[in-house]
Amino acid sequence: MTPWSPCASRRIFVCVRASVAALGLAILSHAEVALGASNLPPEVGWDYGDVDTGRGAAMSGAQRSFSTSYGALLSNPANMVSSRVYHVGALASIWPEANRQTYGAAIVDSSTSSTRLAGGLAALWTVQDHSGVNRLASDLRLGLAMPFSELFRAGVTGRYLSLRENGDPVLGPNPASGGLSGKSIVRGFGINVGATLQPSPSIAVSLVGTGLNSAGNGFQPTVVGAGLGWTNKSLTFEGNAASDFTTWDRTTMRLMAGAEYLLADHYPLRAGYRWDSGLHAHAASLGVGYVSSAFSLDIGARRSFGEYGATAIVFSFAYHVESSGVGSSSGEY
């Protein structure tokens, strides 16, 4: 087993962060010229502040019960201890119609602690509708998880979000309606808590709450969700439901379902579906991946239909510094 080295972890994280930032700047330099302002409401592109891995996007977000690595850090922190891993990863998310791009880097370690305490760190950068609302966000997440028994695990994530909107208001630039340009309109912490009960290797039930400190804004909504999943290691089915108490002027629901088949022990094939009662929109998703003992790569795409149709394409990569692969059928293990 690889010994814990904080200095090595910091060096890896800095390298991944620099690479992702360079890639993001290169793409954005072209996107600024090619893209006009989005015709979609900003809520569509913001997607409730969620950030998916390639697997999460391919399964329409249905990964609260069976997830691992930094996919768990982003969806249900309890599942960071579902496998013994030490992963360094990066992701890129592109939303063409909403003009949103998100880039991130993460480290998750559940293999080097004698107590099986797992820790994860993620840094995410988002630009949305550069020629319109021009929303820029930095999102930092630190998570911890602990298995309390062979059947039950729980985790918590602290999230810091800094967001600004530099675009001109509808009536054009003026002191009355444009006074917040260049300043953060959101700068604060959020708390996410997750728990998973796994009575057998095949069945897992989860409960996840995000934004539980009630930030009171749609950028950090208070959401409570549950998941139920079944797996036999090569085939996984999962269903999730989430109640959003903040984003809209009423409580809304999102229903998600996903399926995954691991072909030849290396190639996960995925599909999913989502219903969003806030936007009154259906969505379908597909994805593929490759997993080995050294690394994993996942690609997922989700398309919503209706008045606010939008596409999200997500690429994610994980380098397996240390990984036993215990407890998950996902391409992220």
Image: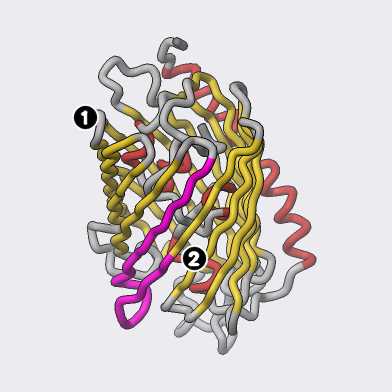
Q: Residue furthest bottom?
A: 171
* Distance of label 2 from label 1 (alpha carbons): 34 Å
How many numbered discs? Answer: 2
| Image: 170 above or below 75 | below
Please report the bounds of the magenta region as a residue range: 235-255
**x then y, percent, for residue 232:** 46, 38
> What residue is drawn where x is 41% and y is 46%?
230
Residue 240 part of the magenta segment: yes
Label 2: few (<14), some (14–19) or many (≥20) C-alpha neighbours in 10 Å: few
**x then y, percent, for residue 197:** 26, 42
Q: Amino acid at mark 1?
A: Ser
| Image: 172 above or below 162 | below
| Image: 181 above or below 162 | below
Give me the disc on residue 149.
1
State which quadrant residue 162 falls in. bottom left
Left or right placement of residue 265 versus residue 118 in this view: right
| Image: 169 above or below 6 | below
Decide which of 322, 44 is in the foreground and name it.
322
Give me the disc on residue 47.
2
User: What predominant SS class does the magenta segment belong to?
Assistant: strand
Question: Which is nearer the N-term, disc 2 or disc 1?
Answer: 2
> What residue is drawn where x is 55% and y is 68%?
45
